[in-house]
Image (spheres, rainbow, N blue to C red):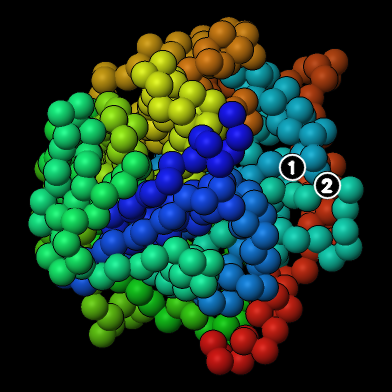
């Protein structure tokens, strides 16, 4: 069948924000030239959540697919570059109280293998250097406040992500989408009409009458206006494994005349963790915590104490989070995207990755099977695999913590609501078994890959307490040489601030 025959003739998206306009952009790219008419309806009475200010490298593919250059979108969205995430205070057993989770590239092929080798020796009781901060170029770039874009072109592109103002990104995508012909309606959906087959037939709006469509996209946030309220889709909670359900956010000033960090900092506090994200005009700060262990007032007070004078006079924004996912993201002729389909706390900044993955995979499966039950099930299984894989890796952070200063951290460490493959990974690492074989065995259940698991386990200091010195004949990776290589390679990258000024061009002075 031709694309024009496959594509839905009319698509209605309920809800704007970053998720809604990302979905609109991807659907228009796939089916706009095939004749699909897209309408996005959003209410002026419902505020946009808009606090997600970080991404994974997956977002680069989104902009590349749509042919949007960094110089076009980054200045509009106050965006900066991201080399990875540092995790201070999560562990008390490492030689440092923090570790950096890098994005990997071909620059790390040899040093990464050296890291894996030393991890194996240390797991079996030999005292060798096995801290991830020493082995990856991205960690050095973050220490030096450098941008992950080389001064001279390389034969490959190092992986990196972004920080950005989520509200501005939604606005940027909205303006671009409406220029491309996507209809934008400001109105309220008062009712949803379901036909005899259980599909959504139309939406009854307050001012625009009935809106009929072949396909409906639910981007209505935690309300789940279509997927939950109209179609009564089952919600699968992650509350028994991920305890955090609240957040408080407070912005802080950033001096762009000084060096600008190129990393997210996620610092463990008494009942959760605080993020610090550098944009080109400010820092985004927040505290993700569990309401079972901390009140909203105490969380705000603790965050302000952590930020110090930076928070003086700054307004706090409190948020509730529904942690988990629906069972069927694609139900009948409705696809749930963004908060309506589920949410996992932003520890690894995966929210937009899951939005993008959901829409792109849906498009692929829809074109393959045109909405058959078989394709719908395969699509839902794949999206659930992505959500559960992210959950499992985030859960590992809490399981591996070694803090003893609060019931929150102790109960997270003692939590036994773990999937079998995560239990197997931890046991294999702890017992000095063939870790490579274990990762291979469970590869079909894992979203995060080999380097990620080594970094989190080694970074958290998951090694024997008693270590013996390496014998002279034992082959170990020379950490001093590795550090020298990372430092020399990092010198081939510009300062973060200088590269941002280049990307922003004439837009930079207005942000000073």
Q: Nearer the viewer, mark 1 or mark 2?
A: 2
**Residue closest to the eye, 26 or 113:** 26
Q: At which x and y percent is residue 158? A: 75, 49
Instruction: For mark 2, give the secondary structure.
Output: loop
Q: At which x and y percent is residue 249? A: 29, 65
Which numbered dot is residue 22?
none
Q: Vertically, is 142 above or below 72?
A: above
Q: In this figure, which residue is indicated by the disc labeled 2? A: 156
Q: Is residue 266 visible?
A: no
Real-space CA distance between mark 1 and mark 2, rounded to the nearest whole angstrom: 8 Å
Q: In this figure, which residue is indicated by the disc labeled 1? A: 105
Q: Vertically, is 424 above or below 103?
A: above
Q: Quadrant of the C terminus?
A: bottom right
183 on left or right of 210: right
**Residue closest to the eye, 445 or 430:** 445
Instruction: For mark 1, give the secondary structure.
Output: loop
Crowdedness near tag 2: few (<14), some (14–19) or many (≥20) residues, C-alpha within 10 Å = few
Q: Residue at x 46, y 28 (%)?
A: 370
Q: Residue at x 34, y 42 (%)?
A: 214
């Amino acid at each position: 069948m031709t694309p024009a025959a496959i594509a839905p003739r009319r698509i209605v998206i309920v809800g704007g924000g970053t998720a809604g306009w990302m979905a609109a952009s991807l659907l228009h790219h796939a089916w706009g030239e095939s004749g699909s008419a897209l309408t996005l309806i959003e209410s002026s009475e419902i505020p946009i959540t808009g606090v997600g200010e970080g991404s994974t490298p997956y977002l680069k593919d989104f902009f590349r697919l749509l042919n949007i250059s960094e110089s076009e979108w980054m200045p509009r969205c106050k965006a900066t570059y991201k080399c990875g995430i540092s995790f201070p205070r999560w562990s008390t057993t490492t030689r440092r109280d923090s570790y950096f989770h890098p994005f990997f590239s071909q620059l790390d092929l040899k040093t990464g293998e050296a890291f894996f080798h030393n991890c194996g020796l240390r797991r079996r009781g030999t005292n060798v250097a096995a801290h991830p901060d020493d082995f990856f170029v991205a960690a050095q770039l973050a220490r030096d406040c450098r941008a992950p874009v080389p001064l001279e072109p390389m034969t490959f592109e190092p992986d990196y992500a972004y920080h950005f103002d989520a509200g501005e990104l939604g606005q940027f995508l909205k303006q671009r989408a409406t220029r491309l012909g996507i209809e934008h309606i400001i109105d309220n959906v008062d009712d949803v009409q379901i036909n005899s087959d259980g599909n959504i037939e139309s939406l009854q709006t307050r001012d625009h009458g009935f809106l009929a469509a072949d396909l409906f996209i639910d981007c209505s946030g935690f309300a789940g206006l279509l997927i939950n309220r109209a179609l009564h889709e089952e919600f699968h909670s992650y509350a028994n494994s991920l305890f955090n359900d609240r957040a408080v956010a407070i912005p802080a000033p950033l001096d762009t005349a000084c060096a600008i960090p190129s990393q997210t900092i996620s610092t463990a506090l008494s009942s959760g963790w605080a993020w610090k994200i550098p944009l080109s005009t400010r820092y985004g700060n927040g505290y993700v915590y569990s309401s079972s262990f901390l009140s909203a007032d105490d969380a705000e007070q603790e965050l302000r104490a952590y930020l110090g004078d930076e928070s003086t006079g700054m307004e706090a924004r409190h948020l509730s989070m529904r942690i988990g996912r629906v069972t069927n993201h694609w139900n009948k002729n409705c696809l749930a995207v963004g908060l309506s389909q589920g949410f996992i706390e932003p520890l690894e900044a995966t929210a937009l990755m899951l939005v993008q993955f959901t829409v792109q995979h849906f498009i692929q499966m829809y074109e393959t099977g045109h909405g058959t039950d078989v394709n719908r099930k395969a699509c839902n299984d794949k999206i659930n695999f992505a959500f559960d894989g992210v959950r499992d890796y985030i859960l590992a952070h809490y399981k591996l913590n070694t803090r003893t200063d609060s019931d929150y951290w102790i109960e997270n460490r003692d939590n036994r609501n773990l999937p079998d493959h995560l239990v197997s990974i931890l046991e294999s690492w702890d017992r000095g078994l063939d870790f490579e074989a274990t990762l291979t065995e469970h590869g079909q259940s894992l979203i995060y890959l080999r380097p990620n698991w080594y970094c989190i386990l080694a970074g958290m200091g998951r090694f024997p307490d008693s270590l013996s010195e390496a014998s002279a004949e034992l082959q170990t990776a020379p950490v001093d040489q590795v550090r020298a290589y990372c430092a020399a390679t990092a010198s081939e990258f510009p300062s973060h601030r200088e590269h941002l000024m280049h990307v922003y061009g004439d837009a930079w002075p207005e942000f000073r």
